[in-house]
Image (cartoon, helix red, strand yellow):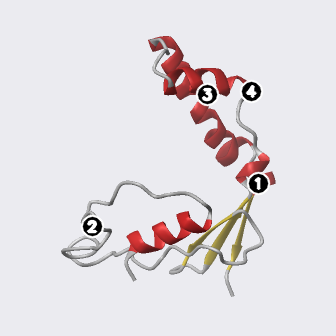
Amino acid sequence: MDMNWVVAQCARRRGHRRTGRSAGADDRGRRYGRIGLKGRLSRQGLLSCGVAIPAQLRLTRLDMAVLVDAWPEWVHPHPRLATPTVRVLDGTASAPERAELGRLWQQRPHRILLEEAEAVVDVHTHT
């Protein structure tokens, strides 16, 4: 199954329209050439949408039989994130405002992965 097709189907199910294309696909999302690095290490067929899982996000390490369930929505973005985001998107942000957006934007993943990990991430083995 073509990965671009899977991504497009997931976006449609969520009501989003997918734009752009990957480096390994033509304008209609059809793949060309070899998949992965020299035909190996393909990620094709590894994305699943609409699967019943007990979390908002699940990462599965197949070779080690490890599952990582996460609930990143539990960690809210910084309250001051909205203003610089709007100004950057409408093109009126100054250089310090763009830098502030970058700093505030990166705080959430930092908090999810390092500060709040015990509350939002559950690592367990797959049986």
Q: Nearer the viewer, residue 63 or 33?
A: 33
Residue 35 rendering spot, x and y as whole percentages: 27, 75
Residue 35, compared with residue 71, is above or below; it is: below
Residue 127 sits in quarter: bottom right
Which label's residue is closer to the chain start, 2 or 1? Answer: 2
Instruction: Bin the neighbour count of mark 4 within 10 Å (Cα to Cα): few under 14, some 14-19, many 20 and up.
Output: few
Judged from the image, the secondary structure of the residue bearing numbered disc 1 is: helix
Instruction: Bin the neighbour count of mark 2 within 10 Å (Cα to Cα): few under 14, some 14-19, many 20 and up.
Output: some
For the residue marked with disc 1, what is the amino acid?
Val
Q: Are marks 2 and 4 in contact (CB under 8 Å)?
A: no
* Residues at marks 2 and 1, CA–CA distance in whole angstroms: 35 Å
Q: Nearer the viewer, mark 1 or mark 4?
A: 4
Which residue position is annotated with label 2?
Answer: 25
Which residue position is annotated with label 3?
Answer: 104
In the rendered view, does 15 fall on the left or right side of 47? right
Judged from the image, the secondary structure of the residue bearing numbered disc 3 is: helix
Which label's residue is closer to the chain start, 3 or 4? Answer: 4
For the residue marked with disc 3, what is the amino acid?
Leu
For the residue marked with disc 2, what is the amino acid?
Ala
Q: Nearer the viewer, residue 123 or 91?
A: 91
Residue 1 sits in quarter: bottom left
Which label's residue is closer to the chain start, 1 or 4? Answer: 4
Instruction: Bin the neighbour count of mark 3 within 10 Å (Cα to Cα): few under 14, some 14-19, many 20 and up.
Output: some
Judged from the image, the secondary structure of the residue bearing numbered disc 2 is: loop
Which label's residue is closer to the chain start, 2 or 4? Answer: 2
* Residues at marks 3 and 4, CA–CA distance in whole angstroms: 9 Å
Residue 120 rendering spot, x and y as whole percentages: 76, 54
Which residue position is annotated with label 1?
Answer: 120
Which label's residue is closer to the chain start, 1 or 3? Answer: 3
Q: Nearer the viewer, mark 2 or mark 4?
A: 2
Residue 9 rendering spot, x and y as whole percentages: 51, 71
* Residues at marks 2 and 3, CA–CA distance in whole angstroms: 34 Å
